[in-house]
Image: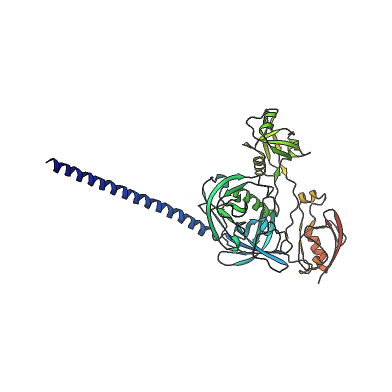
Amino acid sequence: MKRRALLGLLSIGIGLGGLAYGIHARADARDLGLAQQEARRLSDAFVAVSEKASPFVVRIDVVAKSDAPAQGFPFSLGAQESPVQRGNGSGVVFTSDGAILTNNHVVEHAIDISVVFRDGRSLPARLIGRDPGTDLAVIKVDATNLTPARFADSAASRVGEWVVAIGAPFGLSYTVTTGVVSAKDRGGIGMNLVEDYLQTDASINPGNSGGPLCNLNGDVLGINTMILGRASGIGFAVPSSLAQKVAGQLLKQGYVQRAHLGVGIQDLTPDLAAALHVSPPQGALVTNVADGSPAAQATLRAGDVLVEVGGKSVRDSHELMREVIAHEVGESVEIAYLRSGKRSTAKAVLAARPEPIVTVPAPSTGLGGGSMGLALRDLNFREAAQLGLAAKAIAVITAVMPGSPADKAAVQPGDIVMEVDGQTEPTSEAVVRAAADGQLLLRLRRKTGVFYAALKAR
């Protein structure tokens, strides 16, 4: 009797054990199935981003003179015994009529630019404007009904979120890599005037420059710009908020105006903070104030510690610059600062930051039926004032065709036309009219020197 009872209990135990094993096995299978479903969903998200971005991501092929600086030139397609060098980068279509955002270093030295779309179309492009300060540029193709990118709010991006980088690394068109946003607000790298990068571990290589860093909605979070060393796994993208602002100004006026206060600044060290009675040690220390600057008019002075701009706190000099340039030229903003340990506020009307003129060597149809081989535009008021010129509109050479009469006369992009056929400080329109007879006598200013050039149509 006892033996039968023991056998019965043993069989119950074995049955329960088998049941438990079955339950665990089914649970493991269910967990594996759920994991596979999640993996497939993530995979499908990457595929969807790739498909959504395909109409607005382009490869940019460039040709530059062989003496163009190698540093910063886009990925080279191989050494060639040729007076030109070829390379490529990437770009993002941002208007339906053909405006494309890319990096300045992709097109800076280009004498010929072509854009290749995912569907295989190749179109010539012209340079609209460059901004070395952010390493951004805008080019344009003659096209209609293109699909423009949609830009995400980069300020709302989260460290750790998935991102997709798309471009043409090493000339390999439409390459997709994935990673995460590794960090935000990166600066102090020392490559550009304005540094406020998204950092990512998505694989970025030469040729990716100018391509998009997209979120999982397929919206552009940033413009891929540079890598930290080769094969480091660390890349940087200009955030969409800054990229959109720069692109809009370049497309509208061909140059960028940035707001500034007119102060020299440095970061606080713990010793400086203690000496200045700043606790906690954060803010930007003013080292000097330019005469007549917005800061001077707001009665700021050396030794002040700037802690807020327009209601937003700043921890260091990098954040101060970012918050200032987020505002428009001419805008009045409130500045909070510490002086002798006491907090005060002042209103400052932001002015345009003095920056050198960036010439645009756009492809030229030339003057006088294309025979002179040069192109021009008018300086704006700010540019003329920087050069000490009274005229609001005065012609500047923007491109010279190799082998043309202008090239043979040693005319260069950036030369200011001080006089044409006896007319002083002419506009570009006046130069075009003067070229109608097939001859030009130009008095040109280059840096601090002035010289004459005689051009005759071929």
Please tell me which residue lies in front, 256 or 63: 63
The colour scheme used to paint the residues is rainbow
In the image, residue 296 sits, relative to residue 46, either above or below, namely above
User: Which residue corresponds to the image point at 46% horizontal and 55% vertical from the top-left?
Assistant: 43
Question: Would you say 37 lies left or right of 22 here?
Answer: right
Quadrant in the rendering for residue 445:
bottom right
Please tell me which residue lies in front, 247 or 285: 285
Q: Position of residue 171 (x, y in %)?
A: 60, 63
In this view of the protein, can residue 116 be seen by the observer?
Answer: yes
User: Which residue corresponds to the image point at 17% horizontal and 44% vertical from the top-left?
Assistant: 7
In the image, residue 440 sits, relative to residue 345, either above or below, namely below
Which residue occupies the extreme front position in the image?
Answer: 3
Question: Would you say 322 lies left or right of 217 here?
Answer: right
Q: Position of residue 304 (x, y in %)?
A: 71, 33
In the image, residue 117 sits, relative to residue 344, either above or below, namely below
In the image, residue 187 sits, relative to residue 105, either above or below, namely above
